Image (cartoon, coloured by chain):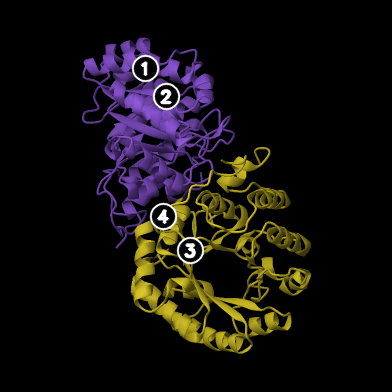
Chain colours: A purple, B yellow
Amino acid sequence: MSAPGLPMVVPAQDLPERVRIHEVGPRDGLQNEKSAVPTEVKAEFIHRLADAGLTTVEATSFVRPEWVPQLADAEQLFPLLGDLRGVALPVLVPNRRGLDRALALGARRIAVFASATESFAKANLNRTLDESLAVFEPVVRHAKDEGVHVRGYVSMCFGDPWEGAVPLHQVVRVCRALMAMGCDELSLGDTIGVATPGHVLELLAALNEEGVPTNVLGVHFHDTYGQALANTYAALEHGVTTVDASAGGLGGCPYAKSATGNLATEDLVWMLQGLGIETGVDLGRLTATSVWLAEQLGRSSPSRTVRALSPKDQ
Amino acid sequence: MSAPGLPMVVPAQDLPERVRIHEVGPRDGLQNEKSAVPTEVKAEFIHRLADAGLTTVEATSFVRPEWVPQLADAEQLFPLLGDLRGVALPVLVPNRRGLDRALALGARRIAVFASATESFAKANLNRTLDESLAVFEPVVRHAKDEGVHVRGYVSMCFGDPWEGAVPLHQVVRVCRALMAMGCDELSLGDTIGVATPGHVLELLAALNEEGVPTNVLGVHFHDTYGQALANTYAALEHGVTTVDASAGGLGGCPYAKSATGNLATEDLVWMLQGLGIETGVDLGRLTATSVWLAEQLGRSSPSRTVRALSPKDQ
């Protein structure tokens, strides 16, 4: 009924049959490491994630190297991933210059990173919310002209460290603007991890009502208050089929107080596997990858599942 | 809309209005500490938990001192709690001798600790399952004759480290036997933390079908694989209104491989507060209590919420 290292499979009613995990570890995780990881380690990390069955792995970011030195090797890294067939490798681009660099290397999927709040737009992008949307508009349009798939991140969808609770209409406005530009999908970020399930369901319903359908929506939860998986479960009940997660729970937000970061992909896969929801991911291989990366980084993974399944206490 | 250190309140549909948290930290948490905590510290811990608004605090255990030396001071501790009015203070009793000790001190609530599997009954109690139920039967009957409230713990309800997945009918059988003896409530334990939400819902439905109503059922999840809060959310959707948790995430199962233990009360309260479900708990006071206890124990709390809310990185 259950294999060692895997949960027993008991489906629940009215949940999706399949979930696409958008793995953000190599980009969102590693960009928050204190020191840069060698390019070859990044390439091996991404290859191992693909081997574990992840079909979407956000690979790197084409921001100005001074801004995110941890990912300054995007030009060196991206060509090392050319042999990965059938794996989507989106890259983050902040502006037209970043898009051109990504396109020159053959990237076929990009992501732009917007904020639902003025404060975070100012802190992260040094622009007002409308100024940042105005910068993204020609980037998204040009990407679409080139036939490139575009994801729009919306950060601070639930709470903001400066502004507190974020009004729904503000999130809806930014989401609609990104869709109107031509984004193919959105990722709703709880950047500081404060959301609870009712808040998640309320935002999803508000977006649906304002013409943003569930099938373009992904969710991106942080485990700062331990809520990420409960929020994910609520989102699945609403019909969401794209969930962001980070292998081993790597990463976090440099603006959030706690070091606790992204939902760990392993904890997510444990739940989805138990629910009989297909992901294509081999949990054993994925855990081995996170244990290997933790060794490279010289510190243990915060993922509960990685700790429970790893051969020794890391 | 939200106060600092508290989530924004957004109710979800069809959830209970109120949840009773059964706090297990002083018993289930401290019994798993390597060395015994001084009696005065335990008494202060319980007083602080009551001050934080917890209405049920499992105080200690009347087992043989050689078996659980960490709780060998039950006779000294219990009288120190006499001034706690309006707070239920259940104590664990393994047999008639333990019950007599508890009754002699004026305990008005007891708990017995059964297992859903033969392997754990053997490992934990050194008896077969039926032998252990036979031991509990006169204990529960005598307690009821004395007008004492009885909780029945059922451990290993979902998975067992030796047997793997646990068949539903086995859990149902033990639950029905405990109810037939006269137990007032049951606590369904996922002792090794392997359950996922579909499994939880299936067990609750099976129990209802076999005559065990939801209003006598509490859930007791462990966070070994990070699933505790998602499982709790599913249980709330089913109508469960009693949830076990441990302040600061204290404790664990000595038989489970990982050190990760009980659902942290703070992580639970964050979710319930966000959902607008009343608990009576003051999250700030509770977190301060866990930070204080962590200082007494000389190590940090594993609770995400405690870490996020504590004034410095513990």
On the picture, is A218 further left or further right than A191? Answer: left
Amino acid of disc 1? Phe
Residue A121, visible in the rendered structure: yes
Mark 2: secondary structure: strand
Number of the label disc, if any, that sits on residue A136: 1
Query: From what the image shows, is residue A116 above or below residue B266?
Result: above
Mark with earlier residue (4, 3): 4
Identify the subunit bearing mark 4: B
User: Do discs 1 and 4 share a chain?
Assistant: no
Label 4: how many Cα within 10 Å (few below 14, some 14–19, many 20+): few
For the N terminus of chain A, which image quadrant?
bottom left
Circle on res. A114: 2
Q: Secondary structure at mark 3?
A: loop
Q: Is B66 drawn above or below residue A59 in the view shown? A: below
- Residue at x 51%, y 30% (from the top left corner): A253
Give the distance between the C-alpha atoms of the residues marked 2 and 3, in whole angstroms.
Answer: 42 Å
Label 1: element kind: helix
Label 3 CA crowd tier, 10 Å (few <14, some 14–19, many 20+): many
Rendered residue at 60%/41% (across/down): B308
Q: Which mark is residue B13?
A: 4
Q: Crowdedness of circle 2 by 10 Å Cα count: few (<14), some, many (20+)?
A: many
Q: Is residue A311 visible?
A: no
Q: Chain of mark 3?
A: B
Number of the front mark, 3 or 1: 1
Q: Secondary structure at mark 4?
A: loop
Circle 3 sits on which residue? B191
Chain that bears disc 2: A
Task: Evaluate whether label 3 is on the same chain as label 1.
Answer: no
Measuring from the top left, give residue B183's x and y in whole percent. Answer: 52, 80
Residue type, mark 3 in image? Thr
Contact flag, marks 2 and 1 (Cβ < 8 Å): yes
